[in-house]
Image: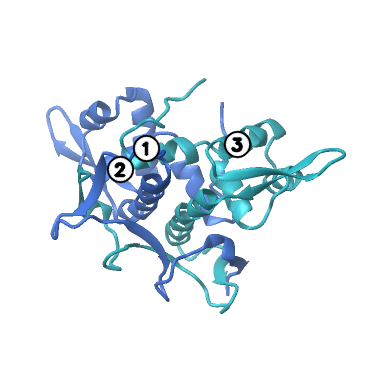
Chain colours: A blue, B cyan
């Protein structure tokens, strides 16, 4: 079953859906953010089949979010390291974290974990703002227009 | 084929992947942000099958991102309106927009469209920051810890 592809879509959201909407991919990226680099470690962490994990890693390398780097000669072994583009995708994951933390637990339930700064130890709550004004982005109050 | 579900995962990113990783769902939500409310209009805009669209709308209603509201009696017709939770999911889409706009076009290519404020007319570039400090979030420099 091949899904409709959106990677040539005019809309940035659609292109990113094409990439991150590939089931498991956000979780592979998340674990890369947490410092996992080796196939076996991703597999153990995620409990995903080797075939699916392999397909996701190939796609993330093809799309330039991960570099595949040999770290051992005999036998050859590779590790997967985030590129600058891959690190930038962390912003999408951070926004997912915030939305999930605020809205995906019911009633008094709360996630067991939180994000915290490694330097200050303070909790970190990601927020999406307009880069120019620092104000919250409210997508339904924006308009689309042809780029100038 | 039922995919592995993540909706009871401990991690907010995983729960959101379960919801938004459902192919097409981010695009349905996006169009809701742009003011589309009617089944026929979603279908025409997205070019998706009625069965898939219907499944996605049911899920978004079940998860509380859209309200299904009757707007006509005979015959009964419904429209789909964003809830507060649905509007909050707009932050994830906004982060996807920014990542896509910066990283999903190659070379000198650029997206044809941009986001702009309806009030000031200025371009809007979403950015993910730490709510407390206003500094950029760098997920790979944060740590996970048990919530206090």
Q: Residue beneath label 1, please?
A: B14
Of circles 3 and 2, which is in front? Answer: 3
Q: Which mark is residue A30?
A: 2
- In what quadrant of the picture does the C terminus of chain A appear? bottom right
Instruction: Tell if the residue under mark 1 belongs to the same chain as the one under mark 2.
Output: no
- Farthest residue, direction bottom: B120
Q: Residue at x 70, y 43 (%)?
A: B47
Crowd band around label 3 with a 10 angstrom C-alpha radius: few (<14), some (14–19), many (20+): many
From the top left corner, tell me how far across and down residue A112 is, in percent: 26, 39
- Farthest residue, direction top: B1
Chain letter, disc 1 residue: B
Of circles 1 and 2, which is in front? Answer: 1
Discs 1, 2 touching: Cβ within 8 Å: yes
Chain letter, disc 2 residue: A
From the top left corner, tell me how far across and down residue B93 is, in percent: 49, 53
Residue A64 in sight here: no
> Nearest the camera: A69 or B98?
B98
Residue A12 in sight here: yes
Instruction: Tell if the residue under mark 3 belongs to the same chain as the one under mark 2.
Output: no
């Amino acid at each position: 079953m091949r899904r409709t592809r959106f990677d040539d879509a005019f809309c940035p959201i659609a292109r990113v859906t094409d990439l991150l909407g590939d089931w498991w991919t956000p979780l592979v990226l998340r674990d890369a953010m947490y410092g996992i680099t080796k196939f076996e470690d991703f597999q153990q962490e995620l409990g995903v089949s080797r075939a699916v994990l392999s397909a996701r890693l190939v796609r993330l390398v093809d799309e330039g979010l991960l570099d595949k780097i040999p770290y051992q000669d005999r036998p050859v072994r590779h590790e997967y390291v985030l590129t600058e583009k891959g690190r930038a995708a962390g912003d999408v994951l951070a926004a997912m974290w915030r939305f999930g933390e605020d809205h995906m637990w019911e009633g008094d339930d709360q996630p067991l974990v939180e994000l915290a700064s490694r330097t200050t130890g303070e909790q970190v709550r990601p927020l999406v703002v307009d880069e120019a004004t620092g104000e919250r982005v409210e997508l339904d109050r924006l308009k689309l227009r042809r780029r100038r």
